Image: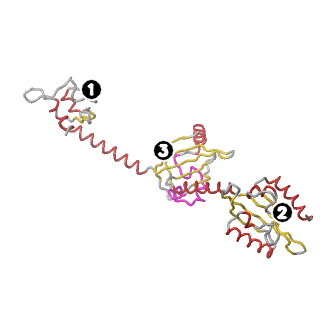
């Protein structure tokens, strides 16, 4: 073992103690053959003992495409004599698919590259976390509701694509604004109380108003959620445009008012039964004709012993011939 390898082993041990055991150290000759491999690199790569010494990268279990990457990296190192970083995929001892980043630095003696020092970093967990984060980001950006992350000072620190589309701003514009710029219904002097209320309850559902870049106001329903990230707290607010819902509700209200007005203006008594013959609606004329108050009418059934259907001659009508039963049993 020459002095260069002894020095590298010592540096490797110190670096691993400092960086952690998700890092592995190695030395390769100019053909990509391993001269030295640190113990934790064996663990990371799924190898054991000294079986990598004298072997090439293709015997580490990396994919053919990644073997080609390492060959290109070695060629570049010898030519440029500057560090190179590549990403590879490999199979561990338990056959699971893993990812790694390899940073290689040329060992130069008298102006000539004589060997390659390298650091092998397992990036599997980082890649998984990044992929999950990407999926979450895609999910947030694909929903039609506006999403805002708001800090304690009412600054908007994050928005999704829907918020940009619904309000007509670019993302960087919205993320430099405050709540007061998009929600005119929240007064600045009342912000602290609003914030403390959300932080205290953890969740609130409120109706408010948002204002677009063009100055158009529209109603929204906001789900405000307390979120803690690191040592900071945020309000993750999800806002839904309820313009259509309010329009429908208003149309239903007007329809109900028209129906009620028409019903009460009739000069005949009107009684509405459900499928069990219970009275669910009526007008004032029906109450007058039947001699009942509105409280007495509601819920009464056709078979109530307190009243009976009779013919014009005053004869009782059998239950099966009651008009309401004849209609309900058709």
Q: Residue at x 85, y 55 (%)?
A: 13
Q: For the residues carrying marks 2 and 3, which lies nearer the camera in this image? A: 2
Kindly indicate the quadrant of the structure image that contains residue 288.
top left
Q: Which residue lies furthest to the left in this view?
A: 313
Q: Residue under label 2, please give it.
A: 36
CA gap between label 2 and label 1 equals: 96 Å
| Side (left or right) of 119 relative to 180 | right
Q: Residue at x 71, y 56 (%)?
A: 93
Local packing at callout 1 (Cα closer than 10 Å; few below 14, some 14-19, many 20+) is few
Q: Per the image, is 237 magenta?
A: no
Q: Position of residue 286 (x, y in %)?
A: 21, 32
* Front residue of 92 and 164: 92
| Pointers 2 and 3 in contact (C-beta within 8 Å) | no
Q: Where is residue 44 in the image (x, y as percent from the top left)?
A: 74, 56
Residue range (magenta): 161-185
Q: Residue at x 78, y 70 (%)?
A: 32
Res. 207 mark: 3
* Front residue of 290 and 154: 290
Disc nearer the start of the sequence (3/1):
3
């Amino acid at each position: 073992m020459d002095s260069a390898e002894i020095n590298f082993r010592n540096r490797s041990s110190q670096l691993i103690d400092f960086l952690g055991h998700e890092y592995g150290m190695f030395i390769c000759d100019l053909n990509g053959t391993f001269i030295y491999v640190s113990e934790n690199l064996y663990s990371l790569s799924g190898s054991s003992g000294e079986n990598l010494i004298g072997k090439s990268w293709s015997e580490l279990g990396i994919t053919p495409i990644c073997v080609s990457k390492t060959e290109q990296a070695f060629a570049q190192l010898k030519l440029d004599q500057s560090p190179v970083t590549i990403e590879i995929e490999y199979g561990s001892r338990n056959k699971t698919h893993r990812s790694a980043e390899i940073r290689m630095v040329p060992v130069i003696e008298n102006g000539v590259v004589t060997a390659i020092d390298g650091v092998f970093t397992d990036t599997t967990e980082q890649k998984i976390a990044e992929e999950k984060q990407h999926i979450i980001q895609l999910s947030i950006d694909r929903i039609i509701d506006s999403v805002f992350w708001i800090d304690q000072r009412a600054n908007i620190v994050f928005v999704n694509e829907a918020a940009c589309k619904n309000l007509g701003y670019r993302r960087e514009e919205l993320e430099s604004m405050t709540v007061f710029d998009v929600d005119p219904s929240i007064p600045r002097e009342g912000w602290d109380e609003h914030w403390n209320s959300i932080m205290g309850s953890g969740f609130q559902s409120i109706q408010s108003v948002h204002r677009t870049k063009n100055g158009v106001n529209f109603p929204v329903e906001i789900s405000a959620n307390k979120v803690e990230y690191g040592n900071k707290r945020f309000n993750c607010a999800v806002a839904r445009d309820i313009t259509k819902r309010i329009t429908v509700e208003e149309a239903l209200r007007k329809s109900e008012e028209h129906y009620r007005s028409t019903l009460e203006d009739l000069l005949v008594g009107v009684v509405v039964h459900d499928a069990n013959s219970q009275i669910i609606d009526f007008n004032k004329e029906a109450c007058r004709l039947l001699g009942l108050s509105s409280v007495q009418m509601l819920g009464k059934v056709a078979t109530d012993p307190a009243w009976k259907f009779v013919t014009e001659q005053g004869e009782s009508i059998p239950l099966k011939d009651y008009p309401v039963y004849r209609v309900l049993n058709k």
